[in-house]
Amino acid sequence: MTMLTNLLHIKYPVIQAPMFLVSNTAMVIEAMKGGIAGCIPALNYRTLEELRAAIQELKAAKVEGGSFGFNLIVNKSNLKYKAQLEVLCEEGCDFIITSLGSPEETIKQAHKVGIKVFCDVVDLKFAQKVEGLGGDAIIAVNDQAGGHRGNSTPEVLIKELVANCNIPIISAGGVGCKADIDAMLNYGAAGVSVGSPFIAATEANVTQEYKQACVDYGADDIIMTERISGTPCTVINTPYVQKIGTKQTWIESVLNKNKKLKKWVKMIRFSIGMNATKNAATKATYKTVWVAGPSIEYTTKISTTKEIVERLVK
């Protein structure tokens, strides 16, 4: 038992991390059956009606020993943020994970209806802000995470946050097997958030090619690119990624130095990058920009969510 298992009433201290395009209700239902928590980005649903239906489906399928939540992007880039938060509070879920902005309003509204709020952070400064705002736990995003990751190693980040914060620390990044979970708990984490190993789940909403890539490639094949969102992001080093390069274009570099234009350049790059990522994940295309973290090292076959959970916890 850890603070996370007590907080979410789950059997094992593991959260199936929310992954853009990948996560869905089928995966979370199987995660709950396996005794862990599952989480889905609210942005995986185009409409509020689809989000509401997903919540209702998960509530109906919830089993003892499992729990479910949703991830919210809480900055101005998510125009649906406030409406999504309202739907989550109306329908109810076990927890919300906030990313990329201040969690203050989310914490305030979620706590009114008994929903716990966990917040992504990459350093102590933001962790202490989260605690000061009343967050229930901290998601410590380290330098082994997939997608947009932190700068500190799991050991350094966990130990620093545990020493200086009084709420549970959940480690995100670098977990591909049970030994990794044990290591994070030994550093002082209350639990872990695991994403990349679940990309190769049979229930995932991505192409077989993307899933197979997580089998065929390993930790040494993960590189950083600025070509998706303008912010460094981890991807599999496919021939296409090698062809287009990993740095922003010279014109983007010049425009990013202009204070007035910088925001718009980032918005355009983010839009282009997200469309490329979506197409690579959901369609047969040679433009293979597949987001993943080094924990795919332990993915040796495409498996059911149930099998992946069992591999992680037993």
Image (spheres, helix red, strand yellow):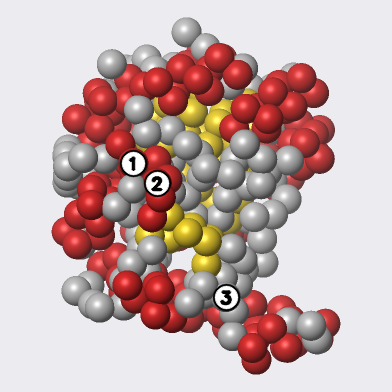
Q: Which amino acid does label 1 sit on?
A: Glu
What residue occupies the far top of the structure in this picture?
1
Q: What percent of the width, then of the height, locates residue 97?
A: 55, 42
Compute the Cα span from label 2 to label 3. 20 Å
Left or right of 300: which side holds 37? right
Instruction: Say if mark 1 contacts mark 2, CB within 8 Å.
Output: yes
Q: Is residue 216 above or below residue 31?
A: below
Residue 209 falls in which quadrant of the image? bottom left
Please indicate, yes or no, whether residue 180 appears anywhere in the rendered image: yes
Residue that label 3 marks: 247
Sequence order check: which comes first, mark 2 or mark 3? 2
Compute the Cα span from label 1 to label 2. 5 Å
Q: What percent of the width, then of the height, locates residue 214?
A: 28, 51
Q: Which residue is drawn at 52% across and 42% down?
A: 144
Q: Which residue is drawn at 58% across and 50% down?
A: 149
**For the residue carrying disc 3, how many other residues have a C-alpha within 10 Å: few (<14), some (14-19), or many (20+)?**
some
Which quarter shows the C terminus?
top left
In the depicted view, which residue is nearer to us: 54 or 18? 18
Residue that label 1 marks: 297
Residue that label 2 marks: 219
Local secondary structure at mark 2: helix
Q: In this view, does 284 lie above or below 25?
A: below
Q: Is residue 294 above or below residue 82?
A: above
Q: Which residue is drawn at 43% across and 33% down?
A: 175
Compute the Cα span from label 3 to label 1. 25 Å
**For the residue carrying disc 1, how many other residues have a C-alpha within 10 Å: few (<14), some (14-19), or many (20+)?**
many
Sequence order check: which comes first, mark 1 or mark 2? 2
